[in-house]
Amino acid sequence: MAALGTLVAGIAHEINTPLGAIQAAAGNLDKAFTVVLDQLPAFSTHLDAQQQGQWLEFLTDTLKPRTPLSSREKRPLRRSLQAQLEGDGIASAHSLADCLVDLGIHEEVDLYLPILKDESQGQMLEFIYNLNRLQGNRQFIQTAAERAGKIVFALRSYAHFEHDSQPQLFQLEAGIDMVLELYCNQLKRGVEVIFNYQALAEIQGYPDELIQVWNNLIHNAIQAMEGKGMLTITTTMHGDQVIIKIQDTGQGIDPIHQERIFEPFFTTKAQGEGSGLGLHIVKKIIEKHQGKISLTSQPGDTCFMIQIPRSQS
């Protein structure tokens, strides 16, 4: 326990140092966003007063808080919107539909058809898209900071895992998609993500803790593939059990290590790269959900399979 306390204190210090920097960066992004927004009227001086008003109304609409959509939810919206735009005679309907859905604009598009048909559409839409990405990145940094804080708390309470919180209903896939979004920059450099999502009803459990599971397994997969390969995520139902598989094409885990992979303090990473607690905490979280986790691995094919009941007894 003394060794554990020393280890946890060191990890907490290491995480809290960049945590302060992340929170400061989030505040700076807020200020930068305000500055960029103030520059919009000057940027669009080539537009007349009516067009400027329409673009500002469009921008205001895109900045409204919205529930994030998963990749699966976006696909049919893109197809439907593309068909509508093509029917309205817009040549760049495909790319425009992609952009509008990413901006959260997929209803009442008729209101903005006059400006979407304007010759300045591409330049202005790119500017607004970048503004939204700036705001989105700020939100992701803030989310990452909050999650890191919860991980610190989980590490500190590692030796006394809490069981008194109440399970809640949530969409399991939303947590996976959020983690993938946080790793977007690392994934887009060479990792192809394959989704095999079966439509799942809401499940009962502890979503914040499960996000730690997805974060750990996805991060490990990216490291195992050294940033290049295929990451496959599968969700299915088997009776009252939810099955989640996270599979990568990385170097694999040596058979002599596979039996110990969930032991505390055991790690196959180089010194300073891993604490040996990540997968053990993952296993404890899965067991808290009355489930189990298993591993199969060979070079080019490593799969963590998680099985949890849809509701907690």
Image (tube, rainbow, N blue to C red):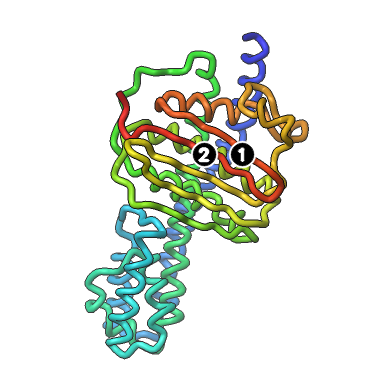
Residue 240 sits in quarter: top left
| Residue hosting label 1 | 296
Classify 10 Å Cα crowding around label 1: few (below 14), some (14-19), many (20 and above).
Answer: some
Mark 2 and 1 residues: CB-CB less than 8 Å, in contact?
Answer: yes
Residue 216 sits in quarter: top right
- Find numbered disc 1 in the image and state the secondary structure of the residue it sits on: strand
* 68 vs 193, nearest the viewer: 193
| Residue 273 appears in the rendering | yes
Q: Where's the N terminus, which quadrant?
A: top right
State the mark number for residue 305.
Answer: 2
Residue found 33% across the figure and 47% down from its top: 200
Q: Is residue 150 above or below residue 4?
A: below
Q: Disc 2 marks which amino acid?
A: Met
Q: Disc 1 marks which amino acid?
A: Thr
Q: Earlier in the sequence, mark 2 or mark 1?
A: 1
Q: Is residue 74 above or below residue 97?
A: above
Measure the alpha-carbon separation of dots 2 and 1. 8 Å
| Image side of residue 204 versus residue 156, left or right | left
Q: Position of residue 271 (x, y in %)?
A: 77, 31
State the mark number for residue 214.
Answer: none
